[in-house]
Amino acid sequence: MRLLDVIGAGVDYRYQWPSGNEESFIWIGYRALESTAEHDVRIGFCDRKTYGQLRRRVVLWIDMYPYAEFVGADDFQYSGEVLSEIKVSDKQGGKMCRYPDETVPEEYAGLPTASLKSRVSGSGVHGAWAVVANVADHHTMFALAAVRRMKRMK
């Protein structure tokens, strides 16, 4: 799957999570192509209190399903970097890939990775591998969402 074109942008995208919580996002929409099928991709940006402080949050939806969520690094205001925990399949549908005990699964090869705890501090931060991207690097964030979509479709 590859991004083809920007199809829209706005400040008013509201998404209701299964928990019932609703968030409002600034968003950019893309048209993507996979074989001969087109897909809608939306990248949303907001701030949310996570790990004890207000952090940047980025969510990527493919055809309105949230496949990737990123959280701002401790130094986000200087680096612009966000991280998303790497998940591995298990009977419950996914568990975090532990850092440094587990190796990063091969489907994530080529994506920049780091220990989540090396970039994010606070209560509840997991000892997990994470994909790292600059908040403006939509291709890396989209690549992670596409990997997760492919895993879900299997």
Image (cartoon, helix red, strand yellow):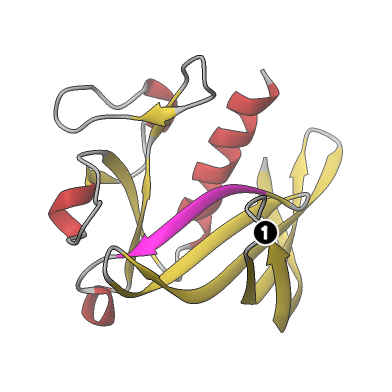
Quadrant of the drawing holding the N terminus? top right
Q: Quadrant location of residue 105?
A: top left
Residue 63 drawn at (x, y percent): 78, 49
> Which residue lies at the image location 21% right of the left edge and 58% below the top edge?
123
Quadrant of the drawing holding the C terminus? top right
- Inspect the magenta stretch and tell me whether residue 71 lies in it: yes
> Which residue lies at the image location 62% right of the left edge and 53% below the top edge?
19
Q: Does residue 36 appear left or right of residue 43 in this picture?
A: right
- Note whether 88 is above or below 127 in the view shown: above
- Note whether 17 is above or below 33 in the view shown: below
Residue 66 drawn at (x, y percent): 64, 50
Label 1 sits on what residue type?
A: Gly
Q: What secondary structure is marked by label 1?
A: loop
Residue 7 drawn at (x, y percent): 79, 70
Magenta stretch prevailing secondary structure: strand
Question: Hey, which residue is sitting farthest front in the picture?
Answer: 20
Crowd tier of the residue under label 1, counting other residues whose Cα lies within 10 Å: few below 14, some 14–19, many 20 or above: few
Q: What residue is disc 1 on?
A: 20
| Residue 73 appears in the picture as rendered | yes
- Inspect the magenta stretch and tell me whether residue 120 lies in it: no
> Which residue lies at the image location 38% right of the left edge and 62% below the top edge?
71
The magenta stretch is: 66-72
Residue 122 drawn at (x, y percent): 19, 61
- Note whether 32 is above or below 101 in the view shown: below
Q: Quadrant location of residue 97?
A: top left
Question: Hey, which residue is sitting farthest top in the picture?
Answer: 91
Q: Does residue 101 appear left or right of residue 47 in this picture?
A: left
